[in-house]
Image (tube, helix red, strand yellow):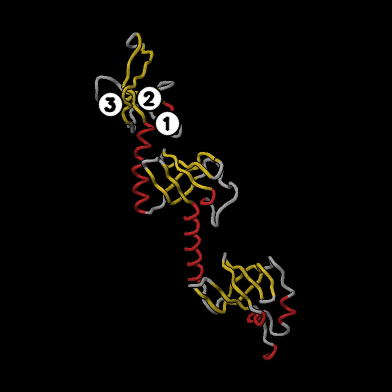
């Protein structure tokens, strides 16, 4: 039975068990017939008006919240030891970071570990679902610290590796000019910057041609070299233009 304050459960004893309905505030309210996870709360009992018994009934007090926390601690410890990713939800924004819920257990995510390269302000809204690694686990002090930054940086590295694996010298790509300088153009292609040296900007008057390009301009480039280890690309613009010598 589910009352206004309690969830009554059969625990296989003479007395029924009672779990505070508030323990399920972040979950779907259980219905009669459902099995729920709970632990005994020693020395506590629930006093309720029970019409069937014509007065006050006493129930063995249980806690679903504590059972979830216990299971979450065990799961978190295993994930920490295995260095596996964990899913959680931002429950509160606090000074210096976020409080994150891991299956009913609270963890702290510092602001510096919430974004790639660190963050100086909050970007994640309450209830945001995030993936992270557990960087500090201290069950004795009930302290858990997590890092979303590590997940994002790892994903970005994998993405860059995939991009570099798919491009090859001689290929033609479209990019965006991110910087114009004396040393040439920096062109961003799928998050990776490649250099166009002045001599590869134009066949004639490359210095003057270099000045005609602007930041944010879209350009078509030919891939001249790929450095997978250094995650660098070299592009050419003139290679897609007619060579005056051949005209």
Question: Is residue 184 found left or right of 124 in the rendered image?
Answer: right
Which is nearer the N-term, disc 2 or disc 1?
2
Does 187 appear above or below 119? below
Mark number, residue 229: none
Give the number of marks: 3
Question: Is residue 13 found left or right of 190 in the rendered image?
Answer: left
Label 1 crowd (10 A; few <14 / some 14-19 / many >=20): some
Mark number, residue 11: 3
Question: Is residue 202 found left or right of 190 in the rendered image?
Answer: right
Q: Nearer the viewer, residue 1 or 232?
A: 232
Q: Position of residue 169 (x, y in %)?
A: 53, 78
At mark 1, the secondary structure is helix
Mark number, residue 7: 2
> Residue beneath label 1, please?
24
C-beta proximity under 8 Å, tags 2 and 3: no
At mark 2, the secondary structure is strand
Does 209 appear above or below 46? below
C-alpha separation, residue under disc 1 versus residue under disc 3: 18 Å
Label 3 crowd (10 A; few <14 / some 14-19 / many >=20): few
C-alpha separation, residue under disc 2 versus residue under disc 3: 12 Å
Q: Nearer the viewer, residue 119 or 224?
A: 119
Residue found 57% across the figure and 79% down from its top: 224
Q: Quadrant of residue 192?
A: bottom right
C-beta proximity under 8 Å, tags 2 and 1: yes
Label 2 crowd (10 A; few <14 / some 14-19 / many >=20): many
Does 102 appear above or below 213? above
Residue found 33% across the figure and 33% down from its top: 37
At mark 3, the secondary structure is loop
């Amino acid at each position: 039975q589910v009352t206004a304050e309690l969830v009554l459960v059969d625990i296989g004893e003479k007395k029924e068990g009672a779990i505070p309905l508030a323990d399920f505030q972040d979950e779907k309210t259980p219905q009669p017939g459902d099995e729920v996870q709970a632990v005994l709360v020693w020395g506590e009992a629930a006093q309720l008006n029970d019409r069937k018994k014509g007065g006050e009934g006493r129930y063995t007090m249980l806690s679903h919240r504590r059972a979830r926390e216990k299971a979450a601690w065990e799961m978190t410890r295993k994930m920490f030891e295995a260095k596996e990713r964990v899913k959680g939800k931002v429950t509160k924004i606090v000074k210096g970071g976020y409080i994150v819920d891991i299956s009913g257990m609270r963890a702290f995510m510092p602001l510096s570990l919430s974004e790639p390269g660190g963050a100086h302000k909050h970007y994640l809204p309450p209830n945001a679902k995030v993936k992270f690694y557990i960087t500090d686990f201290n069950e004795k002090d009930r302290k858990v610290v997590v890092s979303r930054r590590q997940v994002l940086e790892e994903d970005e590295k994998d993405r860059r590796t995939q991009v570099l694996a798919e491009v090859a010298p001689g290929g033609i790509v479209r990019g965006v000019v991110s910087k114009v300088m004396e040393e040439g153009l920096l062109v961003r292609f799928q998050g990776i910057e490649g250099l166009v040296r002045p001599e590869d900007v134009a066949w004639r008057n490359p210095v003057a041609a270099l000045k005609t390009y602007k930041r944010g301009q879209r350009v078509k480039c030919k891939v001249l070299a790929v450095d997978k280890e250094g995650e660098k690309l070299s592009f050419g613009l003139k290679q897609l233009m007619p060579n005056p010598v051949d005209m």
